[in-house]
Image: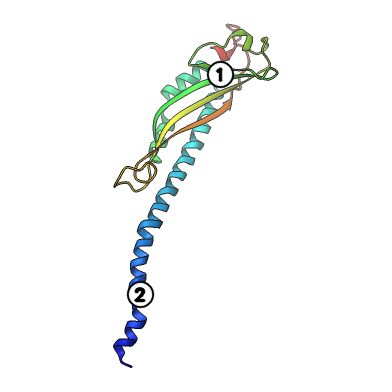
Amino acid sequence: MSITSQRGKRGGTIAEFGTAFVVLVVFFFIPLVNLSFIAVRYFIAQGLIQEYVHRLAQVEKRSDAYSMLSSDTWWKDFCDRCGVTVSSHVLKLQVCGANSGEKITVNGGAPVSTQWLPGGSKGPCVYTMDLFVDVNVPPIYSGGPSVPGITSPLPLQIAAHSNWENLSRNPVTTEYFINE
């Protein structure tokens, strides 16, 4: 047996392994890491938005919640630093009658009708602040053909809810804080 025939039998698989390893890394591991970062960024944004809507539900007046949403941008900045871009957001108040099962949605600063207020004819009611945020979650690596979630940002809508906590009346105006 010659030296060259022994070398050919043993070393042929090493060259094949190198090529297969490059294909495995480029076509499997990099896209897998790319997709996993989308999930990490999504969960960071979801947790941040859930915490923020809870803060909005704890303010004294509902008008304060809307003004806080429009003026306070720390949550958008934090999302940007995590790689998630916020494109739009909508804050609504949802009122559910506990006994009747009926529900209404109050947009913007519109007042809640007296029948849906605490002590009203539709009561008792549960008041929930709903925040809907449209976000774009990009992968780590981008380029090539535009495939959402793989090579371009994935557009998603994140919804977060928190119960309104201040059901008392303003002692000065005798109006419920939820309507101010």
**Residue 88 vertical position relative to residue 13 in the rendered view, above or below:** above
**Residue 82 location (% of width, % of height):** 41, 41
**Residue identifier under label 1:** 60
Q: Is residue 153 above or below residue 8?
A: above
Is 145 on the left or on the right of 109, as rendered?
left
Q: Residues within 10 Å of mark 1 (few under 14, many from 20)?
A: some
Residue 65, percent from left and from top: 50, 20
Q: Residue at x 51, y 12 (%)?
A: 110
Q: Secondary structure at mark 1?
A: loop
Tally of numbered tags: 2
Q: CA distance from mark 1 to mark 2?
A: 70 Å
Q: Check disc 1 and give the amino acid type.
A: Glu
Asked which quadrant contains residue 24, the reply is bottom left
Q: What type is the residue that disc 2 sits on?
A: Ile
Q: Quadrant of residue 178?
A: top right
The spot of residue 67 in percent (x, y) is 45, 19
